[in-house]
Amino acid sequence: MSRDFDSRSRGSIDEWLVPLAFIIPAAWVVWRVPGFILTFGGGTDSMGNRFPVAGLIDWVALALLPIMFIVGLLTVKRAHMEFEDWGAFDRVSIFIGRITMLLVVILVAVMGYEVFMRYVIEAPTVWATELSLWIAGFIFLFSGLYAMQQRSHIRIFLLYDVLPRGLQKLCDTISAVLIVVFAIALIYGGFGEAYDKFLRWETFGTAFDPPIPATLKPLVLIIVSLVAIQSVVNLIRDWKRAPEHHTAADDIDEEEIAKMKKILGSDDDNV
């Protein structure tokens, strides 16, 4: 593991600010996609009646996206429980993981606001439920990529652990190939539908009417592609690792237990 990947996250404020600085313009751009489509001569008549063409703020937000994404890749740090061996592409998955974590906070805030408005003020919103569903869709997809990078996706080790390292590598290779084949098949079969939903900016059909189909359908294909790439990256980086043997102790975080002991004021090993 190289030196620049050896520093561990300590929960500094920049770990929240950089993903937030990406999420804000990203949310603006996603909401204003119809303006960009109309600017380039696409879109439907109903889209033209509902949305203006892209303006200065829209282009500034769009320009900020790659800038903040690169800043995020350069500043992201490994947390103490995360997989230690990083490569260049792993930074993409990790930063998207950081965005996902912040989206969870935003999702909880939206749901909490709706609970307050509905049961305390007795003035429920028309947007919170659909917005929560929309954000949850992003979280579900992004977390899959993060889970793949962390090797925390569902894996059955009962047979894998008893195999020699050569057969373990064969199993890993077959797994990566199947993931890549699945990604190619999904993109081949779903590209046309996702493309059409995006260009006509298909919405959810509710009072708030968010563009859930128009955004999540293409995002499925993008994330599945990134998961396939990450699976190949994992295969390459894990190729020279020692034979793996897994136990229940793998899920124990010694550092977290030490922190809990310190909080409880106990040195008892049975705590």
Image: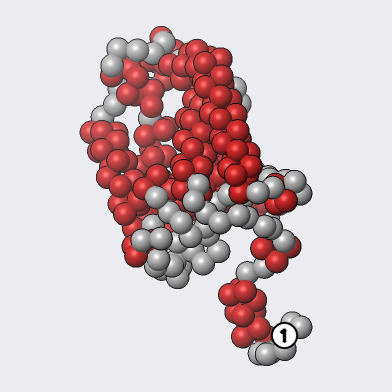
Q: Nearer the viewer, residue 189 or 89?
A: 89
Residue in front for this viewpoint, 88 or 147: 88
Q: Quadrant of residue 155?
A: top right
Q: Is residue 79 above or below residue 161?
A: below
Q: Which element carries disc 1, helix, strand or loop?
A: loop
From the viewer's perspective, is residue 166 above or below residue 35? below
Quadrant in which the C terminus appears: bottom right
Task: Name the spot of residue 210 as percent of width and height, x first.
Answer: 53, 29
Is residue 170 among the parts visible in the rendering? yes
Given the image, on which type of amino acid does mark 1 rest?
A: Asp
The N terminus lies in quadrant:
bottom left
Q: Is residue 212 left or right of residue 122?
A: left
Q: How is the image coloured?
A: secondary structure
Q: Is residue 137 left or right of residue 58?
A: right
Q: Count residues near mark 1 (Cα–Cα under 10 Å), then give few for <14, some for 14-19, many for 20+.
A: few
Asked which quadrant contains residue 136, the reply is top right
The answer to whether any part of residue 190 appears in the image is no
Q: Position of residue 118 (x, y in %)?
A: 68, 48
Q: Residue at x 68, y 90 (%)?
A: 267
Residue under numbered circle 1: 269
